[in-house]
Image: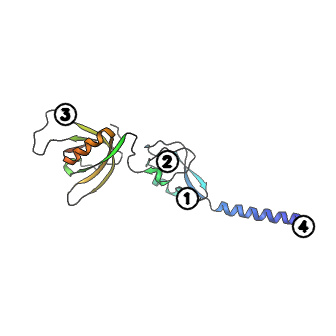
Amino acid sequence: MLSVLLIAVCATGGAAAFARGDRSEPVLALAKAVANGDTIDADDLREVRWTPTEGVSAVPSGRRSEIVGKRASTDLRPNTLITVDQVTDGAVLQPGQVTVGVALAAEQMPVRPLTPGQHIALVSTPQKGGDTPTVTPSQIEATVVVVGRRDERSGKTVVEVAVSTQDGALLAARAYTERLAVVARQPGVGR
């Protein structure tokens, strides 16, 4: 009789454990460390089985293509689950940087669209109709964070850029005067 009871208890416990295991899902975890601001590559990720837990979110492995190619918005440690709030399409602010929005008309930008993460220089320009500078104009190095939609009424596009903290106020003042032009670098190419 005791052996029958023992078998029944073990079978019930095994069935409960099996039922809990059935709820696990394939999700993405970090295979190796990814530093804040670095692009996430396919080999940075691995699939793990995970049982959903209240208050903890994870990215299903079927959404791998939505993560690969984005930037880490914080330092990511190996063997941890990845969440959507840990990645971004835009550039990531580094310590000592601020963002500034710059409204630009079509003639102030290159024809090719700017892209998040692209390094650019914002060059001071003379007043419209003014003399051509005889010395090299001053410029502020920046990284594109977000490119807004073109405003139909004004014809301007707001571009949010990351600049050094010391250049932030100067760029904001120059942006207000609308005396700036963008010199773009090839996407992915450094300053």
The total of numbered circles placed on residues is 4
Q: Amino acid at mark 3?
A: Thr
Give the Cα distance between marks 3 and 2: 43 Å
Q: Residue tagged by mark 1?
A: 55
Which residue corresponds to mark 3? 136
Q: Quadrant of the N terminus?
A: bottom right
For marks 3 and 2 on the same chain, the one whose residue lies earlier in the sequence: 2
- Looking at the image, residue 38 sits to the left or right of residue 55; the answer is left
The label on residue 42 is 2
Q: Are marks 3 and 1 in contact (CB under 8 Å)?
A: no
Three-letter code, disc 1: Gly
Cα–Cα gap, marks 4 and 3: 97 Å
| Pointer 2 or 1: first along the chain | 2
Residue 185 visible in the snapshot: no
> Dividing the picture into quarters, in which one does residue 93 lie?
top left
| Cα distance between the residues tagged 2 and 1 | 27 Å
Cα separation, mark 3 vs mark 1, equals 55 Å
Camera-near label (2 vs 1) is 1
Which of the two labelled residues, at mark 2 and mark 4, occupies the earlier sequence position? 4
Q: Which of disc 3 and disc 4 is earlier in sequence?
A: 4
Closer mark to the observer between disc 3 and disc 2: 3
For label 4, the residue is 1
> What kind of element bears circle 4?
loop
